[in-house]
Image (cartoon, helix red, strand yellow):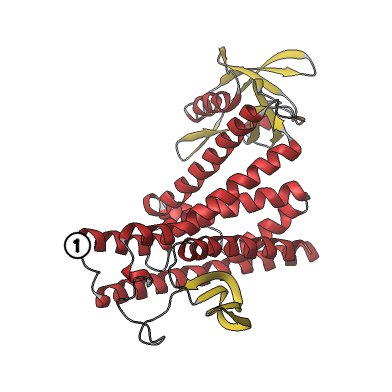
Amino acid sequence: MNVLISIGVLGFLIFFHEMGHFLAAILQGIYVDGFSIGFGPAILKKKYKNITYSFRAFPLGGFVSFPDEEINNIDPSDPNLLKNRPIIQRIIVISAGVFANLLLAYTILIINVTSIGIPYDPEPGILVLATQPEKAAFNAGLETGDKILKVEGITLGVGDQAINTLVKEIQSSADKSISIDIERAGTLKKISLIPKDVDGKGTIGAQLQPNIRKETKKTKNLYELFKYTNNEFSSLLSKTIQGYKGLITNFSSTAQQLSGPVKIVEIGAQLSQQGGTGILLFAALISINLAVLNSLPLPLLDGGQLVFTLIEGLRGKPVPVKVQIAVTQSSFFLLVGLSVLLIIRDTSQLLLVQRLLNQ
């Protein structure tokens, strides 16, 4: 059931993306002849007012199609053909899917914040969530639930800043003893630990987080609601962009964290177990990912079409068809090849985990 929910969420997000393109064209009076969710052979198809609506066999994608004047017997100079519209109007149509997903993600976050509230401001210190057996933190006597207040006599402060201060000190102190002040059950204690050297950086084998209460509170007013939502949206968008940027700057490392369709559905199924909140979070995360992914300058994606359109605007004439075909074919094989590899990898990992659980 949870898997079906996650697939349903993916399908809805793709529908919303394509609807952005569709409405941007229709509202500007541009001819559209097809609206499809999925690729491959059509399972359901209905023609209404010269537009064919279809649901296809492979629902991990979709497209809005525009009529070919030769096939549809349309005057090539007809101003309502997409290619004959001003560059700015075509850019609006191309970009509308990305903006639709961003708008949807922002709306989902507002709904989530309104329904469950926002966390209290972080309190001083860092919480220890767990320690790994036989690692530095465990050997030094650090326990789950401890609150770390100081490192080497330096007060850590609150939030992510406190985490960053502690992590930097640990990483720079490989195989060296450092002193930390903790609070345990209302009692202050001082302990020493020696971070283990791993690739030149110190590690202690502990899971840490800012000292934030589990409870949430309702927003006081609209200002607080939108301020928190803005921060959450900006943070998710920034982290997503950084993730895709890592594919270029540090591919070998980032590729290990890259998720394919199978993994995405698995994550969605896990989050849906948390109820409505988990489903909303999954939808917001994937919607932002779809927006960023489609912004990439690959011809099969919105970003690639936008690049072709901008070049046409600068040159005063379209990019040669042969060039577009060559670049598009290369992009197609790249995306399909990457998708197949990710599906195989994620499916293999999922089957392995299930096999181990059944032993």
Q: How many marks?
A: 1
Q: Quadrant of the C terminus?
A: bottom right
Q: Around disc 1, counting alpha carbons within 10 Å, would you say few (fewer than 14), some (14 to 19), or many (20 or more)?
A: few
State the residue position of label 1. 315
- Residue 253 appears left or right of 179: left
Q: Nearer the viewer, residue 286 or 122?
A: 286
Can you give x and y, in whole percent of width and height, for residue 14 in the image? Answer: 58, 63
Question: Type of residue at label 1?
Answer: Arg
Asked whether residue 208 is in view, the answer is yes
Query: Is 357 situated above or below 231?
Result: below
Can you give x and y, in whole percent of width and height, for residue 206 in the image? Answer: 64, 34
Q: In which quarter of the image is residue 287?
A: bottom right
Query: Is 148 situated above or below 279?
Result: above
Residue at (52, 80) in percent of width and height: 50
Q: Is mark 1 on a helix, strand or loop?
A: helix
Can you give x and y, in whole percent of width and height, for residue 303 in the image? Answer: 39, 59
Q: In which quarter of the image is residue 148?
A: top right
Query: Can you name the residue that lies furthest to the left here?
Result: 315
Residue at (56, 74) in percent of width and height: 36
Can you give x and y, in whole percent of width and height, for residue 246 in the image? Answer: 43, 49
Q: In which quarter of the image is the N terminus?
A: bottom right
Asked whether residue 297 is in view, the answer is no
